[in-house]
Image (cartoon, coloured by chain):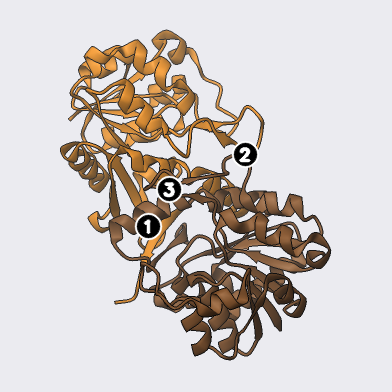
Chain colours: A brown, B orange
Amino acid sequence: MNISVLGTGSVGQAIAGRLAGIGHQVFMGTRDVAGSESRTAPDGWGNPAIGTWIKDHPEVKLVTFAESVNRGSDLIVFAMNGHAAFDCLNGIGSQLLAGKVMIDISNPLDFSKGFPPSLFVCNTESLAEQIQQQFPGLKVVKSLNTMSNPVMVNPGLISGDHSVFLSGNDAEAKMVVSGILQSFGWPERNIIDLGDITTARGTEMILPLWVRLYGKLQTPLFNFHVNMAKQ
Amino acid sequence: MNISVLGTGSVGQAIAGRLAGIGHQVFMGTRDVAGSESRTAPDGWGNPAIGTWIKDHPEVKLVTFAESVNRGSDLIVFAMNGHAAFDCLNGIGSQLLAGKVMIDISNPLDFSKGFPPSLFVCNTESLAEQIQQQFPGLKVVKSLNTMSNPVMVNPGLISGDHSVFLSGNDAEAKMVVSGILQSFGWPERNIIDLGDITTARGTEMILPLWVRLYGKLQTPLFNFHVNMAKQ
């Protein structure tokens, strides 16, 4: 597939690298291509800057947001932080987004008052719903937002069964996303389709617990599993 | 121990029955003892009315809220719905509550606008924090609110390992609660102390996901497990 990955941070890098590694043509979108290419200082967590990463991944094309969606038109992965969503998507425009499937990995985390972060939208709404509402022609599927990026693309890092959720209004779009997840190594039994896009409230609202578990466990290498009754 | 269980609904019944079954003296608190004793119509889910249940459980004493705390002074379990918290606890009064350990199982679920419920407090606050703030002498430990009541008192219903969380400011109170959980059958490795009472935001905010999973799975017999990286 020709895939657009919007975002050049650690989530974008993990997703883009993994998709390219399994044979997809990946167009990574950024606001400012030259600016991104010139960035070489690792972030506070030791993740490589996009300028370094893209040199190490010549199979991934770094282009503008709009060009990324234009050329990676089979699937869009929104891998930026939640605050950036509307700036980025409005810039691309509803015409270019119409009809496309988009995995929304973002979370509405607000760190403006320090730790722990709160959510800038929650409870009776979700960021995924806001995006779906703003771009009715886009087929938004919320997924992968409940775990750290190494786990997203390599579920085998975690022991045993563990869960990934899908929320979206379009059944076919969810099948496309499920296929991508399975190609990352997610067994179908661990992919839980929660229902329509409003169910993204639930997965976005798990973040406050995720953040505290990260603090407690001192590693992002964990994930939630929905464990069922004994047969 | 002499234990106060506040609430006569299905959660209160499950907790009171289990605690009595393992040898504790349980004082179940209700607003109106005679009124509760006279209620015999099962609820919409087929759970027995308290009047029927208490006749079948003569080992549990049905008393007023205040008498329940007075006589069950070793531990309080708040097992009512979140809306009822301040009415009940203010009625008992801070003097009687001071110094006691209270497991808060309640969730701030608001069904006033139908399904799915929203939370009437969340994000930058939690019901557990509000209770702790209103009653500084009470040692509030949020726990067990992330699962259905059969699972709370009988974790062996669910296959494999699955998690229960603790949030609270008082380390000794959390040890007391951990001991109770272990007596219910929770292995210590599955009891996760998230930290202070503000971490209850995370566990209360998991409810919107829980509710959707319940809809999807068509059974309340599931629970979340925090699954770690392979060793």
The percent position of residue A94, horizontal first and vertical second, equals: 80, 60
Residue A124 disc label: 2
Location of mark 1 (residue): B162
Please state which amino acid type lies under the numbered disc 2.
Thr
> Which residue is pictured at 34% across the width and 49% down the height?
B164
Q: Nearer the viewer, mark 3 or mark 1?
A: 3
Give a yes or no on whether discs 1 and 2 share a subunit. no
Q: Quadrant of residue B180?
A: top left
Q: CA distance from mark 1 to mark 2?
A: 28 Å
Up-down: is B199 above or below A24? above
Image side of residue A17 versus residue A49, left or right: right
Please state which amino acid type lies under the numbered disc 1.
His
* Residue A224 visible in this rendered orientation of the protein: yes
> Which residue is pictured at 54% across the width and 51% down the height?
A108
Q: Secondary structure at mark 3?
A: loop
Location of mark 3 (residue): A117
The percent position of residue A218, horizontal first and vertical second, equals: 29, 62
The percent position of residue B222, horizontal first and vertical second, equals: 48, 53
Image side of residue B140 versus residue A51, left or right: left
Circle 3/circle 1 CB separation < 8 Å:
no
